[in-house]
């Protein structure tokens, strides 16, 4: 077909995918399921567009995942994930290893998989998906520390699992020794981390001092810097995924010019990457080959959700407590176990052994495809209910409002939105009684659909929305104070409540 026809088809697919995001948002489903559906409809079993090239799919998939990881790092608030990083790193390394071993042993015993195939399946299914986690969690009112663990974990665990899948796929029928596996993984992660930690600060330093002639160049420069990190790490035989995530995390939390525009550009690029990636994976799948993989896929998925993931969370939580970096309650462990969403990343990883010609890898791809669809349908929409049942919701937490505003940038200030939930002890408190630090002020109150500028004696009511402008330096103090008053009222300080997470 001529290029203009392909452009027309591509544009129509993107517009249809964008329209479908509204449906996904209302239903609580990750958008990836609808995008995969578009690919299946367009494929050989639908409109008949042929696509059966796992090597090309792997290359496109890796590039799209790099864009998605860059967006994840650029839009992650370091202040929210800082305390969660130690536990997230344990989950992304030790937890991943536990998940791989538990799932591999289970499918080897229950389904009779060869050891190398079982390990590949375990490695492919080990990582949580950044796009799926971000799309669901950023709508869930859970405590920042808990959300930060899941966000940081999904950003960090791609790197070790990609390395694991590549090493296992290259090993063929011979399982690599544990020593070799750990050494190669450690070296690649170390190189990736070094590159990311070098490019991120250097890029932030340069962007703060280079006056570009157009504001639209700043978002392009930021995204280009993240790919400099990715490409440099890969050329040095390191982890490109770890490098790009660390670089994006550093740049996203640096006070750069036009930060809001940069975040918006990155989000748009990530959405386009997700749409293209999921549609491509849907095209690659062959529905007529799926029936034989349904039972093994459901068994493996059940083991993953009910055994492997909880085991990895439990082991990581115990280790975190032993080394005194985090204490995780059983309710939080249960939520972390259920919130380990899988998405495009496992499907993309399943193309690696397929492209390498590993025996049985096409069956692994089909099984992973079924697992992602079925268990995303099960877990995604039920996460809000599970969070409420486990009592880990935090509806009164302040969250960012992104506004492109030069004065806010010059003042190095943030705009926060706080919704007052029913039962909060903020109800009835006058604004002056909040005793916010000097660098913060409640600038607007939205009540019953109407907005007004408050005075110091304005009382806060349940269901109000407060807009708070705060300097970056005192933002943490503002959030802690609001959290403390919400829990214990205006005399929270007398009760020793400090608003810690």
Image (spheres, rainbow, N blue to C red):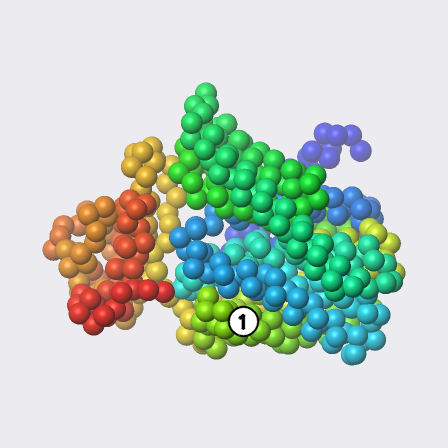
Q: Residue at x 54, y 46 (%)?
A: 246
Q: In the rendered image of this protein, does residue 483 appear above or below residue 105?
A: above
| SS at circle 1 | helix
Number of callouts: 1
Point out residue 142 in the picture as x, y percentages from the top left corner. Answer: 42, 64
In the shown orientation, is residue 10 left or right of residue 47? left
Q: In the rendered image of this protein, does residue 171 appear above or below residue 100?
A: above
Residue 186: quarter of image: bottom right
Q: Residue at x 23, y 46 (%)?
A: 439
In the shown orientation, is residue 149 left or right of residue 446? right
Q: Residue at x 37, y 50 (%)?
A: 400
Q: Which residue is mark 1?
A: 319
Point out residue 91 in the picture as x, y percentages from the top left corner. Answer: 57, 64
Q: Residue at x 27, y 54 (%)?
A: 478
Whether residue 406 is visible, yes or no, is: yes
Q: In the rendered image of this protein, does residue 16 appear above or below residue 460?
A: above
């Amino acid at each position: 077909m001529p290029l203009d026809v392909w452009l027309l088809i591509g544009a129509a697919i993107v517009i249809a995918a964008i329209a479908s995001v509204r449906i996904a948002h209302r239903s609580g489903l990750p958008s990836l399921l609808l995008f995969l559906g578009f690919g299946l409809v367009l494929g050989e079993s639908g409109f008949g567009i042929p696509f059966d090239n796992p090597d090309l799919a792997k290359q496109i998939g890796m590039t799209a995942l790099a864009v998605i990881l860059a967006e994840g790092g650029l839009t992650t608030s370091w202040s929210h994930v800082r305390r969660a990083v130690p536990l997230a790193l344990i989950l992304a390394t030790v937890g991943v290893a536990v998940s791989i071993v538990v799932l591999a042993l289970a499918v080897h015993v229950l389904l009779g998989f060869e050891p190398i195939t079982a390990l590949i399946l375990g490695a492919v299914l080990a990582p949580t998906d950044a796009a799926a986690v971000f799309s669901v969690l950023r709508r869930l009112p859970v405590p920042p520390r808990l959300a930060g663990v899941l966000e940081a974990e999904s950003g960090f665990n791609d790197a070790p699992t990609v390395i694991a899948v590549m090493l296992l796929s290259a090993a063929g029928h011979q399982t690599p020794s544990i020593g070799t596996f750990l050494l190669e993984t450690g070296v690649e992660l170390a190189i990736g981390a070094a590159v990311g930690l070098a490019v991120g600060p250097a890029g932030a330093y340069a962007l703060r001092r280079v006056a570009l002639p157009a504001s639209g160049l700043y978002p392009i420069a930021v995204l280009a810097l993240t790919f400099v990190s990715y490409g440099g790490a890969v050329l040095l035989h390191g982890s490109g995924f770890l490098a790009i995530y660390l670089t994006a995390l550093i740049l996203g939390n640096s006070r750069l010019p036009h930060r809001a525009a940069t975040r918006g550009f990155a989000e748009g690029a990530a959405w386009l990457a997700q749409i293209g990636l999921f549609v491509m994976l849907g095209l690659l799948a062959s529905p007529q080959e799926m029936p034989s993989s349904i039972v093994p896929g459901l068994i493996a998925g059940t083991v993953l959700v009910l055994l492997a993931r909880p085991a990895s969370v439990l082991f990581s939580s115990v280790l975190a407590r032993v080394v005194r970096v985090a204490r995780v309650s059983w309710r939080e462990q249960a939520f972390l176990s259920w919130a380990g969403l899988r998405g495009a990343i496992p499907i993309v990883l399943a193309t690696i052994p397929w492209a390498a010609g590993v025996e049985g890898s096409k069956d692994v791809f089909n099984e992973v495809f079924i697992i992602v669809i079925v268990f995303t349908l099960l877990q995604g929409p039920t996460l809000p209910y599970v969070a409420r049942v486990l009592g880990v919701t935090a509806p009164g937490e302040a969250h960012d409002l992104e506004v492109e505003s030069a004065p806010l940038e010059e003042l190095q200030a943030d705009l926060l939105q706080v919704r007052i939930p029913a039962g909060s002890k903020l109800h009835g408190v006058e604004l002056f009684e909040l005793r916010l630090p000097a660098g913060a002020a409640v600038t607007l109150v939205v009540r019953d659909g109407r907005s007004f500028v408050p005075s110091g004696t304005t009382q806060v009511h349940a269901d109000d929305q407060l807009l708070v402008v705060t300097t970056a330096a005192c933002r943490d103090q503002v959030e802690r104070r609001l959290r403390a008053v919400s829990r214990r009222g205006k005399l929270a300080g007398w009760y020793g409540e400090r608003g810690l997470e």
